[in-house]
Amino acid sequence: MEHFLLEKNRLNEFLSALRNYEVFAPVRKVGLTVFELITNPKEAMLDLKNQPQSPKRVIFPQSEILLVFDKNNAAKEPKGRVGQKPQVVFGVRPCDARGFHMLDPVFEREYPDPYYLQKRQSTLLVGFHCSEPYPNCFCTSVGGNPSSPEGLDILLTDLGEQYFLEVITSKGEQVAKEGAAVLSSPTSQQQTEKEKLSGMAPQKIRRTIDTEGIASKIEKHFDHSLWRELSGKCISCGICTYTCPTCHCFDIQDERVRGRANRLRIWDSCMFPEYTLHASGHNPRPTRTERLKNRMYHKFKQNIDLYGVPGCVGCGRCITLCPENVDLVANLKVIKNL
């Protein structure tokens, strides 16, 4: 693993050197901070602890054209998908990088998804060590760490006037070569400072939950009346799923546009009443109680059965952004104590 030093006042030069890549970074848009393609390094907003929206949408877009049908019903690939240009997602947090690791097996198994996988394989992730974790983060409770390089190609640690840059993968090595003109070698003192910060970060996590045994508790008490109480404040808005780095439910729809038709993949949410609505009118999850219970079962029981880890990275967005203050950690503790 190679180590470099990047002066903060040369960060824009480093980003400008990545001319062979499309660069995505957090930008301010209509009062929100979202990951968008940037054309000027100055657009990037890198001073936030975490973004309200995860970078998941760069590789798994909220709305994506899969096929285009002309007036003769001939299907074609949408422009831009074949031979996609390599891209860099800059400003990723360790929890969001783990999120991509959790999405990978979903889109790779029995029926590999070419739309996701092509973008994933051509994407490089540059992350930031969380020296000051977000108030509702609980990543250490679900196997994460605010300084973990897992899933990243490059990891940056803020040393004040400089960034300590760690190259994690061969993809990251190539990017470091592109920006080599503005990189230097760190001193042993800077290496020590970086290691000190990495050791301190987990201790700053304010929220924790012992998830050992949660899966069996959820299964054992699946029909418990307590679920109605836990879901009482939920309004089925779906913000917990739309901001989650690991949620991946989608729908396929067709739309007509100026004499042609597009086949779209769009995000869906298991918290929406219509999500499980059958054509017959029957709905196996008609209430908020069934839907919240299903979501927690999927995250903390089914995902463990399928992939060996909870389907949650502990980013805390679902807690922070919920308009009714439904608290996942608090709910897990209630279930844990049953």
Image (cartoon, helix red, strand yellow):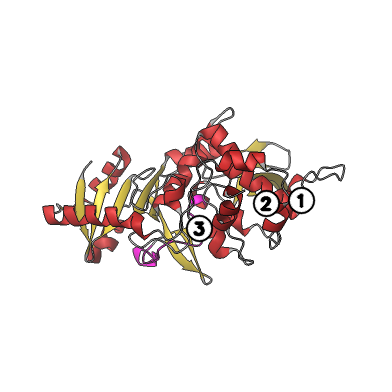
In the image, residue 272 lies at what x, y percent? 71, 53
The verdict on residue 152 being magenta is: no
Q: CA distance from mark 2 to mark 3?
A: 16 Å
Q: Secondary structure at mark 3?
A: loop
Res. 63 in view: yes
The image quadrant that residue 187 belongs to is: bottom left
In the image, residue 64 lies at what x, y percent? 60, 48
Q: Which mark is residue 60?
A: none
Q: Which mark is residue 274?
A: 1
Q: Residue at x 69, y 63 (%)?
A: 233
Q: Residues within 10 Å of mark 1 (few under 14, many from 20)?
A: some
Q: Earlier in the sequence, mark 2 or mark 3?
A: 2
Q: CA distance from mark 3 to mark 1?
A: 26 Å
Q: State the residue position of label 3.
A: 316
- The range drawn in magenta is 40-56
Q: State the residue position of label 2.
A: 292
Q: Residue furthest left?
A: 188
